[in-house]
Amino acid sequence: MKRLRYSVAMSLDGFIAGPKGEYDWIVMDPDFDWAGLYGQFDTLVMGRGTYDTMRERGMSPKGMGMEAFVVSTTLKPEEYPDVTLIGENVAEAVEALKAGPGKDIWLMGGGVLFRSLLDAGLVDAIDVAVEPVLLGSGVPLVPEGQRCMLKLAECKVRPNGLVTLKYEVA
């Protein structure tokens, strides 16, 4: 069974984006093994906002070697043939993805989507890259919801001050 992993960058004070959605504070470590990260996944699940940001940056799921599922009730499938849109029954759709063969699923960005899937018991792991910056305000890592116990699986400190934390959902 595939695992659903929320993989995200976060400021030290707990934000995944600035107050206007900005992410210019995320440090791009030139020594980071992006191919190694991408190779752990064959599927992306994201909300519309994250998908819009990805497209604005000139990125595509196919360029990352992954199949993508975008949660949106407003996008039209015929206008976005490179992704599969999920407009309803999100938890059920993700549960079906997890039941299929293949590599892990990257739940990318989007605290609200993360919270809904976490509360549904579908998130298996949380991988957070803690950036050495204090934003003061912004989009929180996770909105209010149910308590969730975690088990630390890995902690690494990068030379640029970035700390990567990997947790298993207990």
Image: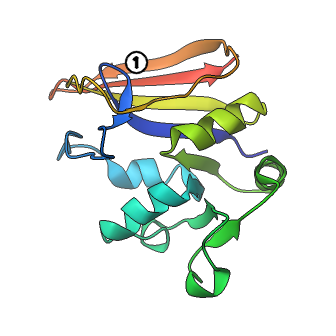
What amino acid is found at the position of numbered circle 1 in the picture?
Cys
The residue positioned 56% from the left and 80% from the top of the image is 80
Q: Quadrant where the N terminus lies?
A: top right
Is 53 situated above or below 25?
below
Where, by quadrant of the figure, is residue 74 drawn? bottom right
**Could you tell whether 44 is left or right of 133 in the image?**
right
| Residue drawn where x is 73% and y is 63% of the image | 87
Front-most of 63 and 77?
Answer: 77
Circle 1 is placed at which residue position? 155
**Left or right position of 52 against 122:** left
Whole-percent x and y of residue 77?
Answer: 66, 80
Q: Quadrant of the C terminus?
A: top right
Dot 1: element: strand
* In this view, 58 is above or below 13: below
Query: Dot 1, crowdedness within 10 Å: few (<14), some or many (≥20)?
Result: few
Viewer-nearest residue: 141 or 73: 73
Q: Position of residue 130 (x, y in %)?
A: 32, 26
Location of residue 78 in the rendering, given as x and y in whole percent from the top left corner: 64, 87
Residue farthest bottom in this picture: 78
Residue at 47 percent of width and 56 percent of height? 49
Left or right for 136, reference 73: left
Number of numbered discs on residues: 1
The quadrant in which residue 135 appears is: top left
| Residue located at (79% from left, 46% from top) | 91
Depth order, front residue of 74/29: 74
**Residue 6 at least partly seen:** yes
User: Residue 2's x, y, as percent?
Assistant: 73, 46
How is this picture coloured? Answer: rainbow
Question: Is residue 123 something that shows in the picture?
Answer: no
